[in-house]
Image (cartoon, rainbow, N blue to C red):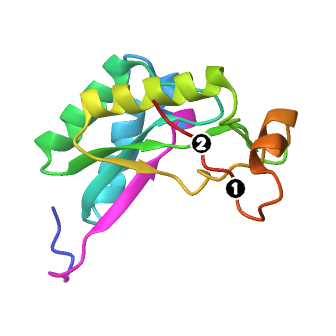
Amino acid sequence: MKSDGYQNFRAALYIRALEIAPLGDDIGVMTDRISQMLKHVRFGKVYLEIHRDMVVPERATLLALKAWFRERGIETAAGITVTIDELSDFKTYCYSDDFYRDKLKGLVQMAAELFDEIVFDDFFFNNCKCKKCIAAKGDRSSPATIEWE
């Protein structure tokens, strides 16, 4: 790698599930692009997103990318964005709905199996306005606390 002139700085890269999922078993297109970036920026860590807008990349794809980065001395971690549809007013998971709580639990378990670190993207907010969420919130101005099993 070309000398980049800095010693106390590491950049991080966040790759969205929407870019990872279409790769399937051919990560070459992405790794070629990242190789070009590595000529100019030293990445210390790459976050591989495992969910966004209900898109979940294949485990094999995530593992192949993780291995590719590890071979280059770059740490990897999981990223999770808890959105259903960003184009529809950032529609997010409904934490009052068992389906979405179970889905999130499964995503966290998957991320924990594949990576040592998980970061939730900044869409971990809740903008659901279903009857259950409104009832759970009551008259509080902040979101309701949901009991997790």
Residue underneath mark 2: 146
Q: Quadrant of the C terminus?
A: top left
Q: Is residue 139 at all visible to an observer of this figure?
A: yes
Look at the image and tell me in which quarter the N terminus lies: bottom left
Relative to residue 62, is residue 47 depicted above or below?
Answer: below
- Residue on which disc 1 sits: 143
Mark 1 neighbour class, 10 Å CA radius: few under 14, some 14 to 19, many 20 or more: some
* Residue drawn at 27 percent across, 56 percent down: 45
Amino acid marked by disc 1: Pro
- Quarter of image, res 135: top right
In the drawing, does residue 59 fall left or right of residue 128?
left
For the residue marked with disc 2, what is the amino acid? Ile
Is residue 87 visible in this depiction of the protein?
Answer: no
Pinpoint residue 143: horizontal percent, then vertical percent. 70, 55
User: Are circles 2 and 1 on residues that touch, CB within 8 Å?
Assistant: no
Q: Which of 96 and 28 is in front in this view?
A: 96
Residue 13 forms part of the magenta stretch: yes
The residue lying at 38 percent from left, 21 percent from top is: 26
Q: Is mark 2 on a helix, strand or loop?
A: loop
Residue at image x 27%, y 46%? Answer: 117
Q: What stretch is highlighted in magenta?
A: 5-18
Q: Does the magenta stretch include residue 142?
A: no
Q: Residue 104 carries which label?
A: none
Q: Which quadrant of the view contains residue 48?
A: top left
Label 2 vs label 1: CA separation?
Answer: 9 Å
Q: Residue at x 17, y 67 (%)?
A: 2
Q: Which of 126 and 146 is in front in this view?
A: 146
